[in-house]
Amino acid sequence: MEYKQGVELVHPKCKPKIIIEKKPTKKVDIIQKTFDEWAQNGRAELMEREHGKNVSKFLDKVCFEKPFSFLDVGCGNGWVVQKIAKNPKCKKAVGIDKSKKMIIQAKKIKKNSNEEYIHTDLESLKNVGKFDYVFSMESLYYVSSVKAALKKIFKLLNPGGQFFCGTDFYRDNKATAKWSKIMNMQMHLLSKKEWRDFFVETGFETKTKQIKDLKNKRKWKREFGTLFIIGKKPK
Ligand SMILES: C[S@@+](CC[C@H](N)C(=O)[O-])C[C@H]1O[C@@H](n2cnc3c(N)ncnc32)[C@H](O)[C@@H]1O
C-alpha cells in the first residue's frame, strides 16, 4: 500500500487538517523481482552453467522422432529453448517466464526463427495452442499451486505428449532443503514420491530419473543430482 499526504480543505477559521489518503498500488511479486535481479546480475548465465550439464545429459537421450513443438516453463534466459530450436525437427520452441527481464535477455540472444518468448507466468498463459513437449527446469516449485500447474501443463500437451520436469530442490536431496530459507520465498519442497504422486493424480503415465554428476565437487550433485519427473499424457 502506498500512502499519499495531502491537506483537507476545511472552513478558513479552522486549522487545516493533514490527511493521509490510502492509494492502492500493485503488489510487487517477490519471484518476479528476484529473477529480474538475477537476469541483470549474471545469475541467468550462472544457472545455465549450473543446470546445463544434467539437462543436456537428459535431453540428449530424448528421441525426437517426428516434427515437434516444445514449451519451456520458466525458461530464464532461454538457453534450453535455443538448444531445442536447433533440432531440425523442431517446428517451434516457446519459452515463457514470469520475469520480464529474463524474457528481454532471451529475446536479445535469440538465434533461430522458430524460437519465441513470452513474458507471462504459467498461471496466466493462454492462446498458445498445444505442445508435443513441455519442459521445466528448477521452476515448477515456485508456482502457487503445484496441482493447478500440473493440470494446466496436462491441458497444454497433445495426446501422447510428454512433460519433463527437472528439479534439484527435492526433499530426498537434503542439502538443497535450506534453499527456500536462503531465497526467502515460497518454494514447494516435495519428495520424489510426492512429485510422482502429483503427476499420477493429474493423469500422467509417470517415470522418474535421477541424473548425477559423479565428478562434481558438491556431494549432493554426486549422490542425488537432478530429479526428472517424466509425465506422458495418454493418447
Ligand atoms: C531457478 S530459475 C530457472 C531458469 C531456467 N529454467 C534455468 O534452468 O536456467 C526459475 C525461473 O522460473 C521463473 N518462474 C517462477 N515461477 C514461474 C511461473 N509461475 N511461471 C513462469 N515462470 C516462472 C522465474 O522467473 C525464473 O526465471
Image (cartoon, rainbow, N blue to C red):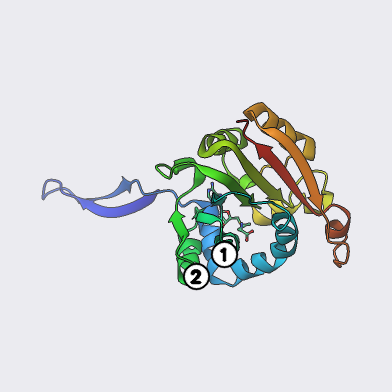
Dot 2 lies on which element?
A: loop
- Circles 2, 1 touching at the beta carbon (< 8 Å): yes
Query: Which residue in the structure is indicated by mark 1?
Result: 86
Q: Position of residue 227 (x, y in %)?
A: 76, 48
| Residue nearest the viewer, comparing 235 with 125 | 235
Q: Residues within 10 Å of mark 2 (few under 14, many from 20)?
A: few
Q: Position of residue 30 (x, y in %)?
A: 53, 53
Q: Residue 225 falls in which quadrant of the image? A: bottom right
Question: What residue is at 10 percent from the left and 50 percent from the top?
Answer: 12
Disc 2: residue Cβ within 8 A of ligand 1's nearest atom: no
Above or below, 37 against 179 in this view is below
Q: Is residue 161 visible?
A: yes
Question: What residue is at 46 percent from the left and 71 percent from the top?
Answer: 108
Query: Which residue in the structure is indicated by mark 2?
Result: 111
Rounded to the nearest whole Å, what is the CA distance between mark 2 and mark 1?
Answer: 9 Å
Going by the picture, which residue comes out furthest to the left? 12
User: Quadrant location of the C terminus?
Assistant: top right
Tell me which amino acid carries mark 1.
Lys
Above or below, 194 against 34 in this view is above
Of callouts 2 and 1, which one flags the residue occurring earlier in the amino acid sequence? 1
